[in-house]
Image (spheres, helix red, strand yellow):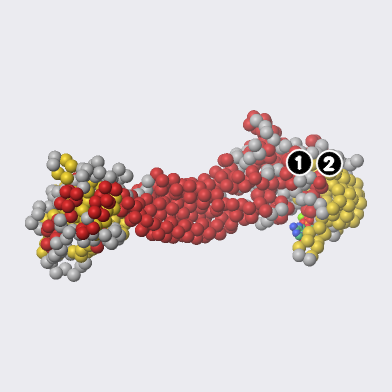
Amino acid sequence: MAFIECRNLTRTYTRGTNAITPLDDLDLDIEEGMFLSLMGPSGSGKTTLLNLIAGIDRPTSGSLTIDGHNIANSSKSELAAWRSEYIGYIFQLYNLVPVLTAYENVELPLLLHGLTRKERHRKVSAALDLVGIADRHDHYPRQLSGGQEQRVAIARAIVTDPRIIVADEPTGDLDKSSARAILDLMQSINRDLGRTLIMVTHDPHAAEWAQKTLHLEKGRLVEQDVPQSTTAGAT
Amino acid sequence: MKRLPFDYAVRNLGRSRLRLAATIGGSALVVLLVVTAAAFVQGMRRSLTISPDSTNVILLASGSEESVERSQIGNSVPSHAIAGISGIREELGTQFVSPEIHMALVVSREAGNPEELRTVLRGVTPTAYLVHPQTEIIEGRAPRQGHDEIMVGQLTHEKMGISKSDLAIGESLWFDDRPWEIVGHFRAPGTVMDAEIWMPLTDLQMAANNEELSCVILTLDTAEFADVDAWTKTRLDLELVAISESEYYASLQRFYRPVQLMVWVTAALMALSGLLGGLNTLYAAFSARTREVGMLQSLGFPRRAIFLSILQESVLAASTGALMACVFSWVLLDGVAVRFSMGVFQLSVDSGATAAGLVAGVLTGIVGSIPPALRCLRLPIPSALKAT
Ligand SMILES: Nc1ncnc2c1ncn2[C@@H]1O[C@H](COP(=O)(O)OP(=O)(O)O)[C@@H](O)[C@H]1O
Ligand SMILES: [Mg+2]
């Protein structure tokens, strides 16, 4: 059984009499440790799929089994607890808390883990080191550049050492060189820490950093896994 | 256990000045209204309360129980009472029996001045000081009979709507076509007497062309109210009714209860409209934070943790406003004189009024934050994350 297994995964939104199905009867296996990119036109269901895997949304039908548990059947509060253990989420717009410093932003998810202050300090420092922003630990988000903010957000996503890291267009708001640095960082997190990484992007250059790219169109996979070089860089 | 740090709530306060100002201002307004209403009701109640150990009985004309000023009884009632009732308090051979005339009168500060200052005059004899032990002369002396002299209470000027210096010792008030010199100031704190003008009984009777009395007040010693009541029924010829002083004040309280109720209702309605106005600002300020709330949930923070943090934030701001309002009311409201038909009372910002205000402030913080917080938290996480 694959680490992440989607079977007949469907998500339908009904608004009045209208029904939209951004994810339609999808089957997908993702092995642990994979760096996968999801591509597709706007509105093709990429974010919807990512949100289902991240446990912040629930499928209308079908099953979604992660590490042997079908999370499609979990309650909202079970999912919340599950997320804090399994998922690190990286957003396009970073979503840092403006009133907290870089350090405190990274510390936030650890507050759900019942650690001592000292243990938290060790983990936060290690994460900030890893993303190369330790010297800015006491800066507030408004004092950081977009690329630095995204580094802090990545540190926040990895600080709890989650099994899966999802990223929704993580470079969508960055200039080319910052984007490259962020992709480099994500690749090394996948490679050195062995974390499963799923990244949504509509930039083909960004997708090249992944081991595998899947294409979505109207809620369905259109093209099966074309293997890519694991060391590819942007052209 | 799974909570957001309190510090996060504190720092969030500084995020939107508009929201902070709206919350502090809104809660201060609500608290001020509640404290004012409470101080009003409390002050009025105090002025209409007589010490609970009062053993005074008021003899009035039967049929005039509602108003001492309308009551007319014979000049001989005091001597009949002394003869007929045993057990009236007595000291050094003087019975505690005070014949009085109470009269609402229009006076002016100068001859021929068309101004009409409404006052309550009380004509008294020296025994008045025995049956009203709250009364204390604080300046000057008691007026002498036949010299056109009067004395005024410490709140009389408030009741008349003139400045305190207008009633300084040596000044005069005009009525019955002549000046009456002010020779003393007295006080009778927390009673309606505090805003009256006192003068010798017979002087007032002559000035008002009235040979009768309004009432006779007795202080009982061994006698009971029932004894006095029974005596009035054996002397039907005197056409008297006996009311215990505490019952008399209780009936005044009942008379003014609708006013007090109206004050509360008005304050509550104003506070409510303030609260609803403030909610708008809060909605706007919190919806700006929707994406962040989505992010916190995506990390695994339970909704109630986020709700609690928003609540802490609001209650903090509201309590700040409440404290400001309380300090403001101690400094500026406490003791402010309010005129009413029975005289004058002073707003009383006591611990009860303060506590009511603080509770209202905290409630404002809670109630004001619940609707915007719920609206923020009701959104599914994916939608919250899409918010701009
Ligand atoms: N909460 C929602 N209610 C209704 N429709 C939605 C909702 N979320 C997404 N959709 C629709 O689902 C489709 C796929 O959305 P999404 O997964 O965000 O696409 P993308 O591939 O651009 O990330 C879109 O047509 C979008 O309008
Ligand atoms: Mg998307």
- Residue B142 as seen in the image, left or right of residue A87: left
Q: Nearer the viewer, residue B213 or B49?
A: B213
Amino acid on which disc 2 is placed: His
> In the rendered image of this protein, does residue A193 appear above or below residue B211?
above
Q: To which residue does mark 1 refer?
A: A82
- How packed mark 1 is, by other alpha carbons closer than 10 Å (few <14, some 14-19, many 20 or more), is some
Question: Tag 2's secondary structure?
Answer: strand
Q: Chain of mark 1?
A: A
- Residue A212 as seen in the image, left or right of residue A182: right
Question: Tag 1's secondary structure?
Answer: helix
- Which residue is at 14% across, 40% downward? B92
Q: Is residue A205 in sight in this rendering?
A: no
x, y percentage for residue B387? 68, 56
Q: Is residue B315 in sight in this rendering?
A: yes
How many numbered badges does the structure rendering display? 2
- How packed mark 2 is, by other alpha carbons closer than 10 Å (few <14, some 14-19, many 20 or more), is some
Q: Quadrant of the C terminus of chain B?
A: bottom right
Q: To which residue does mark 2 refer?
A: A69
- Residue B283 as seen in the image, left or right of residue A33: left
Amino acid on which disc 1 is placed: Trp
- Which residue is at 86% across, 40% downward? A68
Q: Residue furthest front?
A: B234
Q: Nearer the viewer, residue B246 or A18?
A: B246
First in sequence: mark 1 vs mark 2? 2
- Residue A190 as seen in the image, left or right of residue B151: right
Q: Chain of mark 2?
A: A
In three-dimensional space, the C-alpha distance between marks 1 and 2, rounded to whole angstroms, equals: 10 Å
